[in-house]
Image: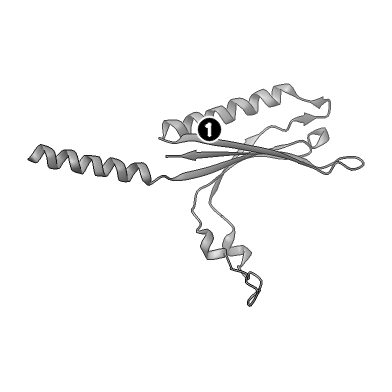
Amino acid sequence: MKKIVFIAVMTLAAAFTANAQQYKVITSVESIVPNGLGRSRIINALEDKDYKEYTSVQTEEDNTRNKADRGDIRVKNFEETKLLNFYNLGGIRFQNIAANDALITSMINDMISNGWELAFVVSGVESEGGKGDGQGIFITRYIFKK
C-alpha cells in the first residue's frame, strides 16, 4: 500500500511540475550602424514584472487611455553583456560577428546548464533605410523554458 501511495504522489508531482512551466526572455541587440558608432549588448532582466499591473481594457463605453507610469514599468536590475558592432570604419567586421556568436553561445550554454531549455528564437532588423541609413539594429529574442 505504501508503494502505491508513493507512486501516486510521485506521479501527481511529476504531472504538476510538467504543467507549471516558466519562461525567460533574453535579448541581444547588435548594431548595424555604419562606422561602428552603435552599441551592441545582450540584455537579461533580473527582476520580474506582472504585465497585468500595466494593462488597461478599452471598451466602447470606456476608452480611457492607459495611465501606467513608465518609471514603474522600467526594469532597473538587469545584466548587460557587451557585444561588438557588426561594422567598423573599414565596413562589416566578420571577426566581430564571430566574437558575438561565441558570447551568445556561452550565454545559451549557461542557461541550459542552469536547467533552461531554448524553446524559441525570434529576430528582426530595424533600419531607417533612407538617405545615409545612419540607424539600425539587429535584435534577437531567445525564449527559454523550464
Reply above or below: 85 against 13.
above
Q: Provide the residue designation for mark 1.
A: 107
Reply above or below: 127 against 57.
above
Q: Residue furthest front?
A: 60
Q: What is the crowding at mark 1: few (fewer than 14 residues within 10 Å), some, or many (at least 20)?
A: some
Colouring used for the render:
one colour
The residue sitting at 51% across, 36% down in the picture is 119
Depth order, front residue of 62/47: 62
In the picture, measured across the screen, residue 16 lies left or right of residue 23, that is left
Which element carries disc 1, helix, strand or loop? helix
Residue 115, located in which quarter of the rendered image? top left
Residue 127, located in which quarter of the rendered image? top right
The residue sitting at 69% across, 26% down in the picture is 97
The residue sitting at 45% across, 31% down in the picture is 112
In the picture, measured across the screen, residue 51 lies left or right of residue 96, that is left
Depth order, front residue of 14/102: 14
Depth order, front residue of 19/71: 19
Q: Quarter of the image containing the C terminus? A: top left
In the picture, measured across the screen, residue 135 lies left or right of residue 108, that is right
The amino acid at mark 1 is: Met
Query: Percent position (x, y) of residue 77?
Result: 53, 51
Query: Percent position (x, y) of residue 129?
Result: 86, 41
Query: Percent position (x, y) of residue 114?
Result: 41, 35
Query: Percent position (x, y) of residue 52?
Result: 52, 62
